[in-house]
């Protein structure tokens, strides 16, 4: 497994080593000791999976405290553009985002820590998306940010007239009016202790 840095140091790309031959392939998609070494202690408690067609955009989502979630996301089939937005007020990267193409050829994964809003858009005809969460989904604490907020300036890589969002995501608040986390409380070293 290889770990690649992004423009926001707390967001990481995990790239597994894939062993393939004429029979197919094999790779480790998660290994706790390796993950702890590069991120810190994380206890994943829920796995989610979705299937979507081209242009479907899910996000930007997060959960408010005390049910804030971290996510390790990957694509089982197809290709997506995955986005993490730093919403920790006081962070050097506050309001900035990382956008990474994830696909089922590279089998790369994105680590989205607590204190970030997350979303993705499907770039292929269809995609199956999977992610591990370190906290349970609690609808009352569900929150989000408008996907096309001009202040964020995210290039989703899909023509706007082809983007499909849910009724809920279409009316999420803009970044300046959305809930923000505290950087001091959600610094990487504060949330993910290392032994």
Image (spheres, grey):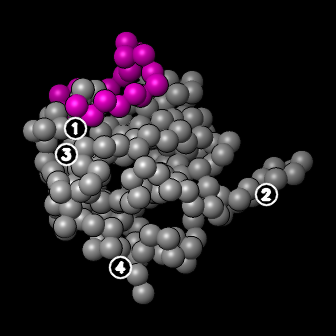
**In whole angstroms, how far apart are the C-alphas of marks 2 and 3?**
39 Å
102 sits left or right of 40 in the view: right
Give the side of residue 150 with respect to residue 42, left or right. Answer: left
The mark lying in front, picked from 1 and 3, is 1
Q: Which badge, 1 or 2, comes first in the chain's sequence?
A: 2
First along the sequence among labels 3 and 4: 3
Most frequent secondary structure within the magenta stretch: loop
Rendering coords of residue 53 (x, y %): 49, 26
Q: Is residue 195 above or below residue 69?
A: below
Q: What span is in magenta?
A: 151-172
| Separation (CA) of disc 3 from disc 4 | 26 Å
Within 10 Å of disc 1 (Cα), the crowding (few <14, some 14-19, many 20+) is many
Q: CA distance from mark 1 to mark 3?
A: 7 Å
Q: Read off the residue under disc 1.
A: 145
Residue lying furthest top: 161
Secondary element at tag 2: strand
What residue would you read off at disc 4? Answer: 193
Q: Distance of mark 4 from mark 2, alpha carbons?
A: 32 Å
Residue 182 is situated, as x and y percent measured from the top left of the image, at 16, 60
* Residue 78 drawn in magenta: no
């Amino acid at each position: 497994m290889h770990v690649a840095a992004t423009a926001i140091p707390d967001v990481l790309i995990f790239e597994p080593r894939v062993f393939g031959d004429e029979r197919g392939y094999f790779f480790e998609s998660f290994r706790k000791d390796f993950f702890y070494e590069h991120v810190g202690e994380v206890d994943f408690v829920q796995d989610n999976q979705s299937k979507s067609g081209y242009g479907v955009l899910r996000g930007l989502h997060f959960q408010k405290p005390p049910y804030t979630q971290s996510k390790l996301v990957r694509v089982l089939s197809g290709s997506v553009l995955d986005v993490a937005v730093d919403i920790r007020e006081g962070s050097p990267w506050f309001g900035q985002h990382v956008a990474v193409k994830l696909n089922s050829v590279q089998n790369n994964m994105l680590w989205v820590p607590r204190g970030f809003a997350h979303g993705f858009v499907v770039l292929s005809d269809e995609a199956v998306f999977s992610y591990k969460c370190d906290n349970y989904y609690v609808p009352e604490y569900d929150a989000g940010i408008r996907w096309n907020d001009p202040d964020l300036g995210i290039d989703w890589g899909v023509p706007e007239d082809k983007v499909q969002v849910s009724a809920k995501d279409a009316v999420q608040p803009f970044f300046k009016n959305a809930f923000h986390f505290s950087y001091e409380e959600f610094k990487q070293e504060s949330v993910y202790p290392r032994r």
